[in-house]
Every structure is written in C-alpha cells, then in structure tokens.
Image (cartoon, grey):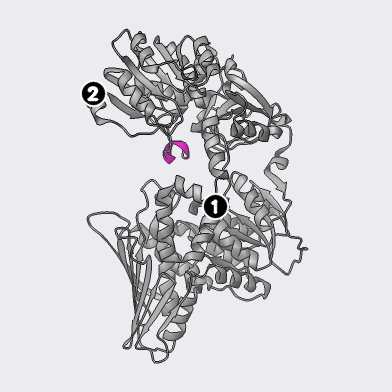
Amino acid sequence: LISPGTERMFIDFGKAGYIRKARQQPHKVKQVIQKIQTDGLQPTIEAIRAKLEQPVALGYCNAGVVTDMGSDARKYGFKIGDQVVSNGPHAEMVCVPPNLCALMPDGVGIEDASFTILGAIAMQGVRLAKPTIGECFVVTGLGLVGLLTVQLLRANGCRVLGIDLNSQKCALARSFGAETVDLSNGEDPLGRAEKFSRGRGVDGVILAAATKSNEPVQQATVMCRKRGRIVLVGVTGLNLSRDSFFKKEISFQVSCSYGPGRYDPEYEENGNDYPVGYVRWTEQRNFEAVLDLMAEGKIDVSPLVSHRFRFEDAEKAYSLIAENNEAYVGIVLNYDSETGNSPDSGIETAWKTIELKNRNKISFDSCKPTVGLIGAGDFTARVILPALKKTGVRLKTIASSGGVSGTHLGNKFGFEKSTTDSEIIFSDSEINTVFITTRHNSHFRFVLEALNAGKHVFVEKPLCLSIGELDKICEAHKSCGSKVVLVGFNRRFAPHIRKMKSLISAMHEPKAMIMTVNAGMIPIDHWTQDPNVGGGRIIGEVCHFIDLLRFLAGSEIVSYEKMKLESGTRDTLSIQLGFADGSIGTVHYLSIGNKGFPKERLEIFCAGRILQMDNFRKLRGYGWPNFKKMNLFSQNKGHEEEVKQFIDSIKDGKSAPIPFEEIVETTKISLNLASD
C-alpha cells in the first residue's frame, strides 16, 4: 500500500533543488557551514552530493509470504509459507526483523492486510486519545489514516465528526458512520462541532491532516470541552496558543507512529519485546489488533482502494500522487511474480543477485585485483568507492543487506553485479580482493571468511571486537601466507602526517605527542555505542589515534593506561602510551567540547622543536630550520592514498602498507583499554 502523504513528501523533497532543500532543512545548513570551516569547501560539497544521491526506499506497508528466515526467527512464531504483514519498503522481496511483522489471521485478504501498518498508526493515535463509549470526537483530515481513525473510534462506541477538503473522502467517512464537514463547500467546522457536541465541546480531536498551517490546532482548542484531548497523528503547524490550552486545561500529545517500540533498536532490530504486563500495546501488538478488527469486520478497508497498479507500473502510481490531477485514496501495488505463491520455487539466486548495466568493461586477470565489496553505507559511497575507482581495478560484485544502496552504488561506480548475499563474494574464484565496510560486529566473520577463501582483505576499523576473535584472525592470516590484510587506519597516510614523520625521523631524542580529539557527543542508543554491535568508541574510533601515534613513534607500545572523567560521560577519556624508544603519547578523546574548536589536533614536542597539525588542513612548525608551515586547501585524512597503496601492494606483490604485527598490536591495546 502506498502511503500518499509520506511518500509524496519524499518525492517532493527528491525533486527539489539545492536551495529549496536548504530552506526545508535550516538546521542542516548550519551543519554544512560548520563542516566547511573544519573540513574545507570541496570535501563538504562531496559529502552533500553523496548524501543527496543516496537512494531512499519508498513505502512501509506491505503484506506477503515468508520465503526465508534467519536462524532464530522460528522462536517468534513464524515459518516459511506464512502470510504476514510487515513494515518493509516497496519491493518484491523485503527483509524485516520479526517485531516488525505480524501473522495474518484467517478471513483477512492479502490486499486488505496491506493496510495494517497505516491502521496501526491510526490505532496508536486513538489509544493516546483514550476514548470511552458515548464520547464525541473530531477527526481532522480524512486521508487513509483519518478514515481508519474514524472506523476505530466508531468501534470504540464514539460519535465522530470528520473534517476534510475532499468531498469523496467525506462521503467515505459518512459510509463508516461519521458526520462530516466538507470544507470545499464552505461549511463551518467550529459551528458544526458546537452543534455536534450538544454545546458542551467535543471530548477530543485527532489531527490526521498534513499541512503547514496552524489552523487545525487552533480550531481543535476551540472545539474541545474543558480538559479535552488533542492528539497529533499527522503533520501540522504547531504555533500553539498557551491561553487556549491554559483556560481549558487541554492535553496535547504527539503520537509516535505505530506505538511503543518504534525507533527503539533493541525492540525493532534486536527483537527484544517489552513485557506485556508493563507495555500492553507495542507496535507489533497494534499490528495484530488491527488485523483482528479486520477479521471481525470492525475495520473495512476495501472501500478505501481507489487504484491498483502492477509493480512494474509503479511510476504511474507515483505520477498520480505527484500531479494530483485525479482523485485517489488508497493505491495498491500488486506483484505478478510467482514468488508470492510459491516460496519454494527455486528463484533464490535470481532475487539475491542482479547484473548491473553501467559496469566497467575490464577483463579478468588473475594477477590483478578483482574486487568484491561488502557494505554500501554513506562512508563507503563518499570515501572508499571514489578512492577505489581511481585505482582502475576490476569492480565485480557489491553486497548490501537491502540491495537498494548496493545497486545504486554499483551502477554509479561500475560494478558488474549487485547482491544481498555476501557468500557469493567469498565463493567467486575470480574475486581475489575483498573490501569490508559493514557494521563493526560483522568484521570478524567477514575477515575470517575472506582469509579462509584465500583473498586479500581491506576492512574498515575495527578489525574485530574481542581478543578471542583477534586470535582466530591471526591464525587464519598465518595459514593464508602472502595475503595482504589492511585495516582502515587511514590517518597515517595523510600528507600532513607523512610530512611530520619525515621531519621527526631525523630526531633521535624521545618525543612527546599529544592527540586531542574534539569528538562530540554520540547518543547512547546509537549502534556504535552498543558493545555487541559497534564495540564502543575506544574500539570503534580511538584505535585510529593509537595507530597514528604508533606510526609516528616508529616504536613498539610497551605501556598504556586509561583515565576517564569521573563525573559525566563515558565518552570523555585520556589514554597514556609509552613507547620502547622512550617516547610518550597522550590521546585526549573528548565528547564535551565545542564544534568551533578543531576536531583533531596533533602536537609533537621534540628537542626544542614543535609541530602542530589541525584538522588535517594546517601544519605549523616551531623551531625547525627549514620548515614553517604546510597548508592544504581542503582536508585530507589519507583515505585515497591508503586505498592506492593497498591495491599497489597486491598488484606488485609487495608487503602490506601497514605491517600486520602493528595492526594486531593496535587492535589488542584498543580491546584491552575498552575492557577496563
């Protein structure tokens, strides 16, 4: 089912020019200005382009048949062949966590079931309004969510007054038992609400409209009785009048999508349900409740379907929404493929891998790198792939979990294939080089598989998340002999760092190095903060700076300790490093700073001389006879040179750009520091 309001918003934003996009997101403009100040103009432009080019899968309401499951999905009560609804995008094949699915009961057709997710949005709004039998409610906005809200309120024994500009939608609301105000005919909503409530004021208003106007909220405060309730389900202007709320003690609440669990990664991604005794109605349980009401005939969605399109004709459906020159309500996309009826039809390979059109025409040469890449996130698109493209290697297969981002980047950079099955990369005898840019908790598995398959490996930091995993990687590396393994410690390849290294290499005295990282806050619920997924900030990012100081010292780390800020965030810490040559290094990793200060500053003190580098753009020397400064027009953290040296080492049969022993040393220290 197409959700017209949400999906039209995405389409309009996608079609808008840069100026209009900027006006729609003023907070992002401020971020852009800050990034220009720290990183320079060109990197900022590249980052913006990469972000805006990133495809977004439309839709979130579907119903279909389970064709495959993860290993632990059975404990959630699903099996292959089940008919389910899911909060997945528009696609013939979708992959959705179990808590975002619900089994379809007998008596509910698959087309009707596709309305379930929108029904849950309406249901959560109704639950927050807490209707009781006999109360009177106003529903402003009679789109799909509004019309479903009307039916849910009627099922709760309430009288309902619906308000909309569209006569067809008003007629549908009346067919569900509501009275209506047709604004297109000039009807007065306030006068009708006064009469409808028998002069007492309505008990509640549910706002299901999509408008920038403040009028729906202002009207709602006038319509409500003393201590009435207003729930915002749609999107309206929120220039609220305190006086109206104050005098009537009106309660106002914004409904969050489908209910408790929404936007909680523990619930949605990790499958950890809330105890029913404490949270009766989660988003999944709301899905089930909507389906039950459909089965009992309390919700009837068949009159809401105004258009049906084959999925191959989806562009016609979106033209209908974008042009808005033909009346529509519910628009359903149908799939003609046999996959919906025959989960065991043997089409697995066909929907996991596709051939790309814009591929590079490079013939296979076993002596040269042929690349398979796993991961298609923003960093991969903006940094890794442009650097890899410049090397001229054969880009064969790109793997991503959902397929959309991988296919987009595959076409853009000239890959031959796009897949959602990473195993295809490891089993392909032509692919001899694997790039891994996925979430941290998958690095160990992919690195181990790549080494066991006899392939060269480039993996973004960290290498792994535990000492046990590190030991297994070391064993695999030892067994595979000459295969190149590189972790993305890019900063040691930056022009400023190479210059600093060349200057201090002539100094035989011990050095004192201070790395100050103005890292900024990351929300505690972000995946990088999860010890089981991201590993935390020491493993995920501080490892960069341990490696950097190890490179500059050119000497083994013989001691290390960590100090944390006692009161405050765990993301603010200081690490002391001692080196075999007597040098010392300090990493100050700070999340309590200000964005106006350089994000990364490195200072080296040695024999009466000082080097100071800011943000990989400016380097200054104090006391150096033949060096004063080295400034770059834009920030360069060494990513391009890092990828080039990795590819060159494979082409030329040379050793890895970073000795594997140093990678292991840095990784082990990072893991130990994180575990303290």
Residue displayed at 54% across by 52% down: 377
- The residue indicated by pointer 1 is 377
**Drawn side of residue 229 relative to residue 189, left or right:** left
The residue at the far front in this view is: 186
Residue 63 percent coordinates (x, y): 60, 27
Residue displayed at 58% across by 68% down: 643
Give the residue type that dot 1 points to.
Answer: Gly
Region in magenta? 264-269
Residue displayed at 51% across by 56% down: 48
**Drawn side of residue 213 relative to residue 641, left or right:** left
Foreground pick, 582 / 402: 402
Please say whether residue 82 is visible from this viewpoint: no
Which label number is shown at residue 392? Answer: none
Foreground pick, 612 / 562: 612
Q: On the image, which quarter does residue 127 sit in?
A: top left
Tell me the element at label 1.
Answer: loop
Q: Is residue 265 magenta?
A: yes
Residue displayed at 48% across by 32% down: 99
The tally of labels here is 2
Which label number is shown at residue 249? Answer: 2
Q: On the image, which quarter does residue 574 sit in?
A: bottom left
Decide which of tag 1 and tag 2 comes sooner along the chain: 2
Residue 304 percent coordinates (x, y): 57, 19
Vertical side of 166 occupied by 272: above or below? below
Give the residue type that dot 2 points to.
Answer: Glu
Q: Quadrant of the C terminus?
A: bottom left
Dominant SS in magenta: helix
